[in-house]
Image (cartoon, helix red, strand yellow):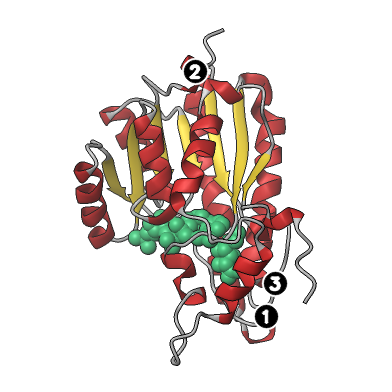
């Protein structure tokens, strides 16, 4: 077996939802570097246009589409357009996601539903849209971007934790339901990554000091740093490639060791 060739994505078509910036952009870049053709979607035309320029600047001929992952008709049209322009989706990365940091007793059911809608129902809708094509092809890779909150809770993120915990189990269920058709569905559980989504947790205080949460996370992470989207590139190529054909239903935590560590004695 040519082990290094098993990591190649030549001839494959990858859809990265929410791939306009942040983690999704880095994962899409990694899959492109491994040979895949890249499609991504987001809701904002401004984000799309800037992302297309950013991909082009990296020499990546990515196709961008406006589509909301919570809208079944938009996702169906997205998958059809990709098939017409690039070919059927071989690799789906369910990356699009939001967070709302609100104490549960102050959070409206509407806010809770919006987070679950995007972070859990969206991945269901997108997986449901691409699996038929994967069944026709006889192979497929689905990578769900989970979270520390697939395993742990913390104050103010009840909806997000519920969604990401559910996404872990959706990952295992897709594995269970379609593993026999040579479709592998795994998760990546990023630790605390420096992206726009976590910017509020890293903002400098009025006196110029580091945000208390920033200090907490660095102390709680054995690697003693925030992760970067680039830390997720290698794991994503592994789970998108033939190198992981016997890995299914697994959540690969890329967290600098935070989940393994009880924390330093104060
Ligand atoms: P981000 O910087 O906020 O980017 C989120 C992306 O998703 C944007 O491109 C956004 O574009 C898109 N998006 C949001 N809602 C969408 C929808 N309904 N339909 C289509 N696209 C949508 O987030 P990130 O930090 O890169 O995180 C990406 C994923 O990793 C999320 O699932 C997040 O929960 C997860 N994660 C993040 C961290 C972290 O520390 N950053 C750690 C663990 C897991 P538009 O707004 O234009 O749609
Ligand atoms: C938070 C953070 C986390 C990260 C990530 C950790 O408010 O705790 O936003 O939820 O985004 O999910 O893995």
Q: Is mark 3 within 8 Å of ligand 2?
A: yes
Residue 239: quarter of image:
top right
Give the numbered dot on residue 104: 1
Q: Look at the numbered disc 3 and give the secondary structure of its residue.
A: loop
Q: Is residue 266 above or below residue 30?
A: below
Give the labeled residue for mark 2. Answer: 4
Instruction: Tell me the crowding category of disc 3: few under 14, some 14 to 19, or many 20 or more residues within 10 angstroms, Cα based.
Output: few
Instruction: Measure the C-alpha gap from mark 3 to mark 2.
Output: 40 Å
Q: Is residue 51 left or right of residue 177?
A: left
Position of the N terminus by quadrant: top right
Q: Look at the numbered disc 1 and give the secondary structure of its residue.
A: helix
Q: Residue at x 49, y 74 (%)?
A: 202
Mark 1 and mark 2 lie on one chain; the one further toward the N terminus is 2
Give the labeled residue for mark 3. Answer: 154
Q: Residue at x 60, y 72 (%)?
A: 112
Instruction: Measure the C-alpha gap from mark 1 to mark 3.
Output: 11 Å
Can you see residue 97? Answer: no
Instruction: Measure the C-alpha gap from mark 1 to mark 2.
Output: 47 Å
Give the numbered dot on residue 252: none
Residue 151: quarter of image:
bottom right
Q: Residue at x 65, y 61 (%)?
A: 221
Which percent across, then down, holds residue 110? Answer: 56, 75
Q: Is mark 1 within 8 Å of ligand 2?
A: no
Can you see residue 88? Answer: yes
């Amino acid at each position: 077996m040519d082990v290094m060739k098993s990591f190649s994505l030549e001839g494959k078509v990858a859809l990265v939802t929410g791939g306009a910036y942040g983690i999704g952009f880095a994962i899409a870049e990694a899959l492109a570097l491994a040979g895949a053709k890249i499609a991504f979607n987001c809701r904002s035309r401004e984000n799309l246009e800037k992302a297309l320029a950013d991909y082009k600047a990296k020499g990546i001929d990515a196709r961008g589409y406006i589509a909301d992952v919570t809208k079944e008709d938009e996702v169906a049209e997205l998958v059809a357009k990709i098939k017409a322009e690039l070919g059927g989706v071989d690799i789906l990365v369910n990356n699009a996601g939001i967070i709302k940091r609100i104490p549960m007793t102050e959070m409206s059911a509407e806010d809770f539903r919006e987070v679950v809608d995007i972070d859990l129902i969206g991945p269901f809708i997108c997986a449901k849209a691409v699996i038929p094509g994967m069944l026709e092809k006889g192979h497929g890779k689905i990578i769900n971007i989970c979270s520390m909150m697939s395993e742990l809770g913390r104050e103010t993120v009840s909806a997000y934790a519920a969604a990401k915990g559910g996404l872990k189990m959706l990952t295992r269920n897709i594995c269970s339901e379609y593993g026999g058709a040579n479709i592998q569905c795994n998760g990546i559980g990023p630790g605390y990554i420096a992206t726009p989504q976590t910017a509020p947790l890293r903002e400098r205080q009025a006196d110029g000091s580091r945000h208390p949460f920033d200090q907490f996370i660095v102390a709680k992470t054995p690697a003693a740093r925030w992760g970067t989207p680039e830390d997720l590139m290698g794991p994503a190529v592994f789970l998108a490639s033939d190198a992981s054909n016997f890995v299914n239903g697994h959540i690969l935590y890329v967290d600098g060791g935070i989940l393994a560590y009880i924390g330093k004695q104060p």
